[in-house]
Amino acid sequence: MKAIRRFTVRPVLPEPLRPLSELARNLRWSWHPETRELFQSVDPEGWRAAGEDPVRLLGSVSAARLAALAEDRRFVRALTACADDLADYLGGRRWYQQQPEGLPGAIAYFSPEFGITAALPQYSGGLGILAGDHLKSASDLGVPLIGVGLLYRHGYFRQSLSRDGWQQEHYPVLDPNELPLALLREADGEPARISLHLPGGRALHAVVWIARVGRVPLLMLDSDVEENGPGERDVTDRLYGGGSEHRLLQEMLLGIGGVRAVRAYCRITGHPAPEVFHTNEGHAGFLGLERIRELAGEGLEFDAALESVRAGTVFTTHTPVPAGIDRFDRELVAHHLGDDGELPGVDVSKILQLGMETYPGGEPNLFNMAVMGLRLAQRANGVSTLHGEVSREMFAGLWPGFDPSEVPITSVTNGVHAPTWVAPEVFRLGARQIGAGRAEDALAVGGSPRWDAVADIPDTEIWELRRELREQLVLEVRERLYASWRTRGAGTAELGWVDGVLDPDILTIGFARRVPSYKRLTLMLRDRDRLMELLLHPTRPVQIVVAGKAHPADDSGKRLVQELVRFADDPRVRHRIVFLPDYGMAMAKKLYPGCDVWLNNPLRPLEACGTSGMKAALNGCLNLSVLDGWWDEWFEPDFGWAIPTADGSATDEDRRDQLEATALYDLIEDRVAPRFYDRGAGGLPGRWIEMVRETLASLGPKVLAGRMVREYVERLYAPAALAHRELAPDTARELAAWKARVRAAWPQVAVDHVEAVAATAVNGHAELGSTLALRVRAGLGGLQPDDVEVQAVAGRVDAADTLAEARTVALKPAGGPDLEGRWVYEGPLALDRTGPYGYTVRVLPAHRLLADGADLGLVALPTEATGEGAGVLMR
C-alpha cells in the first residue's frame, strides 16, 4: 500500500546534542574527517545505511540512542570539539583575508550542476564535480563566493543494467526537506520567491534553497512550487533533461532567476553584493542580460550597461567540441525574452546579436550560449593549457584578423579538492610525517615545501598503504558487483564466483568517467585476445575496474557500455575485469585510492581537462593517459606513462584506434606491469614505489583546487573587480560611446605605407643584434592617435611566411596628420633571433579600460602593396 502524501518528521535532539544539527546542515562534514567519524559513532550501521548522510542518519536514530549519547561524556566532548572547530573555521581569517586590499567583496559563481557530496546528488559528471570542488576550496581559502544553481527534484539518473547489459535509468524523487538544505526566508518567515515572466501572460516561480558549503552559501532555485502550472513545476525536474524549450527555461531560471536569488539573499542576510559574476560554462549566460536589465532600470542605456556588465564578468568554457555547446533557435529566444516575455523594454535585436554565430560556418538562425558568454565577459578562460589553445582556435572567428594565439581566452588548469578526494589512510600517513595541521594546509592551500616530506616516508609504509587501499577496493567491488547481478536477475546460487573477483595483490587499473564516444570506453576491447592475455598473464596479470554512465538519450554510448559489460561477463575473465553501474562520488572515493594505475584514452584534444586522474594521483595512483587535458601539461616519465597518439592517421578513425590500442597494450605489457611486479629488497617494487612518491611530491601541489582558486582570484577575479569599480555609469557611457565611434570609423583605418631601414646593419645585412628603424604611415579615419596603438609584430616565419613566437613593439606617433589625414609612426625593431624572420605592422583600438588589444575584434593590417619594407627579413 502506498502513502498518499509524504513528509519529513525531524528528530528532537536532547540539549547536549543540539550542535549535531548545525554540523549536519553544513556540508563541511563531507570533507572533515573528525566530523564524519563523529556521525559514524552515533550509529555505525545506521551511518552506512544512510549512505553516510548525517541528515538521514539523525532522522533514523531512536530516541533511546540519542538519550544515551547525551549522557556519554566522551561523545559530548568530541561533539563540542567538532562544533568549536566548525565555528573557528567559519569565522577565522584564512588565505583570502590575508591578501592585500582591493580584492572583490563577493563573487557570484553560477553553474548548472554542483557535485558537493553524494548526499546532495545534483551533478552528472566532471563539470559539476569541478564546481563543487571550486566552492569547497573557496571556502577553505576564505574566498567570499556565493554559489548559484538549480535544485533538480530528480537529480541525475541512477544507473542499473538489464540482464543483457543494457543501461537502464531510474530517477529517484528527492525531498528537499530530507536534504541538508534550508529555505531562504523573508523577515516574516515566508519563503523568498523568485519570478520570471513567460510569454502568454504566464509566470515561472521558484523558491531558493540554501546549502551551506563550509563558509560558502550555495543558492539552489526550485520551480516545484504550487503557484506554478504543471509545465513550469517541471522546469527543475531533472538535470539535462527535456527538449529545447525546457532547457531554455532552465537556463533562464539559472541565469536571470539566479541573479534575482543573489539579490534576495544579500538583501535578507546583509551579505555583500557580488562585484564579480563567474559563469561556469554557457548555461548560466543569461545572468548578463538580467544585470543589463537592472542597470537599464537605473537609467543606463543598453550599450553602456553592457560595458558595465562585461567588466565584472568571468566566463569559463569547458568543452572543446562545438556539439557540447547549447544552441537555441533565435525565434525561441526572441519569443521568451521579448516584450511578451522576460525582458520587456530591452531591445531584443541587441540580445540576439550577443548570441549570433557571426563567424564563417556559423548558423545565422541559432543563438549560441557560449558565444553570448564570451561577448558578455571581459575575461574568459579554458580549463587547461591545451584546452585554452583549442578554445582560441574554436572561437577565433569572433576576433577576425587576429591569430588564434591572440584570441583573448586564457587558461586556468582545473584542480581537485584534496580533502574530499584523498583517502583517510593517505592523509593519516602524511599527518604522521609532518603533523596533522601541516597536512591539512598541504591539501587545502598547497605549496611544494609541504609535499617534499613525502620523500622521507619509508618504502614499506607506502607499499603497505597501497595494498590496504587495493584490498578495500576489492571488497567494495565484490559487494557492488553482487548487488548489480541481483538487480540483473541473477539468483544467489549462481553468484558464488563473485567472492573470487579481483585479487588484492594484482596490478589494478581503473577507468571511470562519462561515456561520450570521444572518451573511448571500449578502446581496450580493440584486440580482445590481446586484452585477455594481459588479464590472464601467468606471472604479471592485470585486473581492470570500469564504471561510467551514458547520457539517457545517447544510444551509441549505451551500446559502448553494453559491449564492455558483455566482455566483462565472460566467465573466462570476469574475475579480472568488472563493470560497476551507477558511477558517482561515493564509488569514486573507493576507486581512486584503490587503483594502481588510472587509465584515460580520449581522442586528443577533446578532453578539456579530465580531473579524475588528478584525484587518483593524490592517492598515489599512477596515470596512464593520452597526452590530453592536464596530462599534456604536467606529464613526466618519472610518475606515469603517455599513450602515443596516431596524429597522422586522424582521418582514418579505424586505423587511429587500432594504432593507439596497440600502443596501450604494449605499454601495459612491456613497461607498466614489469615495473609493478619487479621486486627488490624485502619483496618491494622499489621503482614503482619511487614513482608513487614522485607522483605525490610533484603532482600533489599542482593538481589542487586550492591552487586553481588562487589563480582565479589573482588573475581573473581581482582584475574584474577593479574593472567593475572603474565603470561608474558616466564612465560606462563614455566607454560605450568611444567604442561606437571607433567601430564607425574603423572601415577607414588603414596602414598606407611601411618602410624599414637597417639602422645598425652589419656589412649591409640584417644580423643578430642589429636594429631596424620602422616608419609607418597610417590613416586613422578621423580617429586620434590616443584612440589607437600602432604595433610592429615580429618573429620567426615558416615557409608560408606565417609569424610564429611573435612579439609586439609599440610604435610612437612622429607626425601628422597630413593633408589626407594620415599619421606617421616610428620605432626601432631589434633583431634578437636568428633564422627565418619577418614582421608586419598593424593598428589596434586602444583605451585604458580595454582588457586586451583584441577586445573589440578590430585590427587594420597592411595590404601586399603597402611597402617593400614590410614582410620577410631573412630566410
Image (cartoon, grey):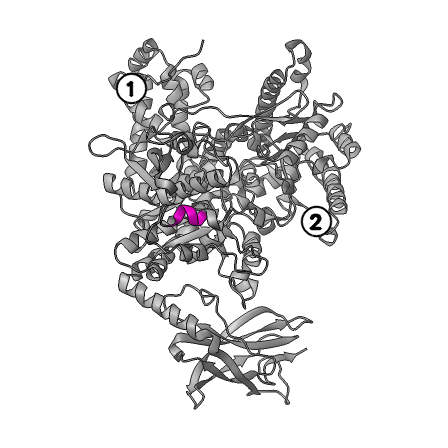
Dot 2 or dot 1: first in sequence order is: 1
Where is residue 493? Give x, y as percent: 67, 9
Q: Nearer the viewer, residue 678 or 610?
A: 610
Residue at the spot 75% in from the left edge and 49% down from the top edge: 652
Residue 684 in sight: no
Residue at the spot 32% in from the left edge and 39% down from the top edge: 195
Dot 1, how many residues are within 10 Å of its Cα: few (below 14), some (14-19), or many (20+)? some
Q: Secondary structure at mark 2?
A: loop
The quarter holding residue 813 reads bottom left
Answer left or right for 813 relative to 404: left
Where is residue 405? Give x, y as percent: 55, 63
The quarter holding residue 77 reads top left
Q: Main secondary structure of the magenta part?
A: helix
The kind of residue tagged 2 is Thr
Instruction: Give the residue furthest to the left.
Output: 188
**Which portion, as a residue range, is magenta?**
333-338
Query: Which mark, residue 17?
Result: 1
The kind of residue tagged 1 is Leu
Residue at the spot 47% in from the left edge and 36% down from the top edge: 433
Answer left or right for 431 relative to 195: right
Where is residue 326? Give x, y as percent: 51, 46
Residue 518 in sight: yes
